[in-house]
Image (cartoon, grey):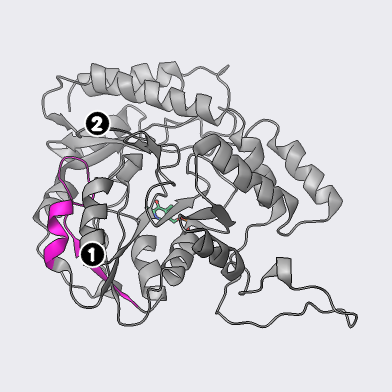
């Protein structure tokens, strides 16, 4: 197998084969996290604020509030959006279970709509007939980092007075019609889990367009206590009156230090991902039995994943495995889970997608040699 041991960031990867994902830790991160440990100021503080400011400066996020996971971000956004018991939230099944469990956490019911077979994203044309009196929100998921049809989805939401809460766990750095993901819908939720583009170990962020809602997110990520307006009394306790249920969802400063360290060079890393994706698309254009996903000119993917459709998928996965390359479906439709009602609504594109989609490695530890090898193996056929 082609490898390049002098490549940056290759330390710590398994020597046997090319994995599907890697975790990126900046060479200076250890030192920066150690500096926080030395201060013993570990919890939420100055560095969390700095991390949020950097998310805005570097990625264009509007009012990001850092939290301790992407799942917390989704739950908190839904709560602040007013989603509660008995409500319904429409989402695609092509996602990780966290999209669905965060809805259940509020007491609402996830309602699955179909996807576009061409990219795995929520089909805007399959939403409206699923809207009922109970529908409160739509949760589009940018599968693999490729932005959904946000204009069409936003128009459906506006017609019916619904809130849009984006699950943008895969989409940090993506753009839609010139605007960054994180600055478009009512709420956008990111994940900084270990294998996402930018990691804080575990972490996430909620962006709320409305400044009042963004303020509410800040309070409710920490029990509902407004720290800025709850002075210490002479008796030695903060003075506040809890008015809304909040959660223990804040990010800690040592995690923010890791996020800040990893932010250095983020754009270069994203450009490299895009360059690899361009090579995959160009060099695998005419491979028999392989159909690429659709890419439109009005949006740019964050390329967390690189996927396409293949014929005889198990043969494809086995043939790559024999050449030391991991290929995977990553996730199939989550609607089959008993927890989500165990129903199998008619989602014909989802079922077709479940049968043919597959993803190949696209991450920071890939060397040029790895990419050559992956392309050559796929071109040989399966
Ligand atoms: C990673 C992920 C999440 C959850 O993020 P965590 O930070 O792991 O809680 C939610 N939705 C999708 C689509 C994800 O991939």
Q: Which residue is mark 1?
A: 335
Disc 2 marks which residue? 319
Q: What x and y, as percent, mark residue 52?
A: 61, 48
Of 30 and 45, which appears nearest the observer? 45
Relative image position of residue 176 (x, y in whole percent): 33, 38
The answer to whether 81 appears left or right of 254 in the picture is left
Q: Image quarter for residue 96?
A: bottom left
**Ligand 1 image position (quadrant):** bottom left
In the figure, 206 relative to 301: above or below?
Answer: below
Q: Is residue 139 visible?
A: yes
Residue 3 lies, with reference to residue 163, above or below; the image says above
Magenta segment includes 1: no
Quarter of the image for residue 370 reads: top left
**Label 2: how many Cα within 10 Å (few below 14, some 14–19, many 20+):** some
From the image, state whether disc 2 or disc 1 is nearer to you: 1
Numbered tag placed on residue 137 in the rendering: none
When asked about the image quadrant of residue 366, the answer is: top left
- Magenta stretch, residue numbers: 108-129
* In the foreground, 267 or 318: 267
């Amino acid at each position: 197998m082609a490898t390049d041991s002098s490549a940056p960031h290759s330390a710590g990867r398994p020597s046997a084969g090319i994995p599907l994902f890697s975790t990126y830790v900046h060479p200076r991160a250890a030192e920066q996290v150690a500096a926080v440990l030395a201060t013993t100021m570990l919890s939420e503080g100055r560095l969390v604020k700095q991390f949020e400011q950097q998310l805005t400066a570097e990625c264009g996020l509007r009012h990001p509030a850092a939290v301790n996971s992407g799942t917390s971000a989704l739950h908190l956004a839904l709560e602040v959006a007013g989603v509660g018991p008995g409500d319904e939230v429409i989402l695609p099944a092509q996602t990780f279970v966290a999209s669905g469990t965060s809805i259940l956490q509020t007491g609402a019911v996830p309602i699955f709509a179909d996807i576009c077979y061409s990219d795995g994203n929520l089909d805007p044309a399959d939403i409206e007939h699923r809207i009922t009196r109970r529908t409160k929100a739509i949760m589009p998921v940018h599968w693999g980092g490729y932005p959904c049809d946000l204009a069409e989805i936003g128009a459906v939401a506006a017609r019916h007075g619904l809130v849009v809460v984006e699950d943008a766990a895969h989409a940090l750095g993506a753009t839609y019609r010139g605007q960054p993901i994180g600055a478009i819908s009512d709420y956008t939720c990111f994940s900084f889990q270990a294998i996402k583009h930018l990691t804080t170990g575990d972490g996430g962020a909620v962006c709320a367009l409305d400044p009042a809602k963004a303020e509410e997110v800040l309070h409710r990520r920490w029990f509902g206590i407004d720290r800025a307006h709850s002075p210490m009394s002479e008796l030695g306790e903060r003075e506040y009156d809890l008015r809304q249920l909040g959660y223990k969802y804040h990010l800690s400063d040592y995690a923010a230090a890791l996020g800040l360290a990893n932010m250095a060079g983020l754009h270069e890393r994203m450009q490299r991902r895009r360059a690899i994706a361009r090579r995959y698309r160009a060099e695998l254009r005419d491979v028999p039995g392989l159909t690429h996903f659709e890419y439109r000119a009005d949006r740019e993917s964050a390329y967390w994943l690189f996927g396409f459709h293949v014929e005889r998928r198990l043969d494809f996965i086995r043939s790559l495995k024999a050449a030391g390359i991991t290929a995977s479906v990553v996730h199939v439709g989550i609607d089959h889970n008993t927890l989500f009602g165990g129903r199998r609504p008619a989602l014909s594109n989802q079922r077709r997608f479940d049968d043919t989609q597959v993803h190949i490695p696209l991450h920071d530890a890939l060397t040029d040699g790895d990419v050559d090898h992956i392309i050559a193996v796929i071109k040989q056929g399966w």
